[in-house]
Image: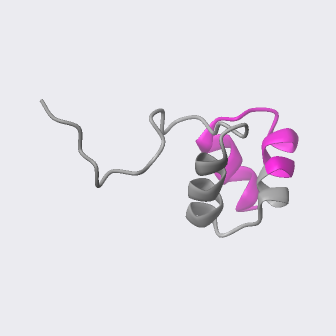
Amino acid sequence: MSDNLTDRGPRDRSRIALEEDWEMRYWTKEFGCTPEQLRDAVHKAGSNSVDKVREYLNK
């Protein structure tokens, strides 16, 4: 099986890796927020779970 080079999303789409610049770019675009807002949301949600961060940002 070959790698799909058109799929540029995170490897684990259930978690947000704040230490990876390319993941920060992906998730800020996905959520329509700034990097600072994303970091704050992960901190305040108490988890890097995509579902928990999405829930926090949609409040």
| Number of disc labels | 0
Magenta-colored stretch includes residue 20: no
Residue placed most toward the observer, 8 or 41: 8
Residue placed most toward the observer, 11 or 54: 11
Where does residue 54 sit, x and y in percent of width and height?
Answer: 65, 52
> Which color scheme did the rendering employ for the protein?
one colour
The quarter of the picture where residue 46 lies is top right
Residue placed most toward the observer, 55 or 22: 22
Against 20, residue 35 (above or below) is below
Furthest toward the bottom, the residue is 32
Residue placed most toward the observer, 57 or 35: 35
Magenta span of residues: 39-59
Quarter of the image with the N terminus is: top left
Where does residue 45 sit, x and y in percent of width and height?
Answer: 80, 41
Magenta-colored stretch includes residue 46: yes
Q: Residue at x 82, y 48 (%)?
A: 39
Q: Residue at x 29, y 55 (%)?
A: 6
Q: Residue at x 74, y 59 (%)?
A: 57
Against 52, residue 6 (above or below) is below
Quarter of the image with the C terminus is: bottom right
What type of secondary structure mainly makes up the magenta span? helix
In the image, taking residue 6 as reference, residue 46 lies left or right, namely right
Where does residue 23 sit, x and y in percent of width and height?
Answer: 59, 47
Q: Residue at x 65, y 61 (%)?
A: 28
Furthest toward the left, the residue is 1
In the image, taking residue 19 as reference, residue 6 lies left or right, namely left
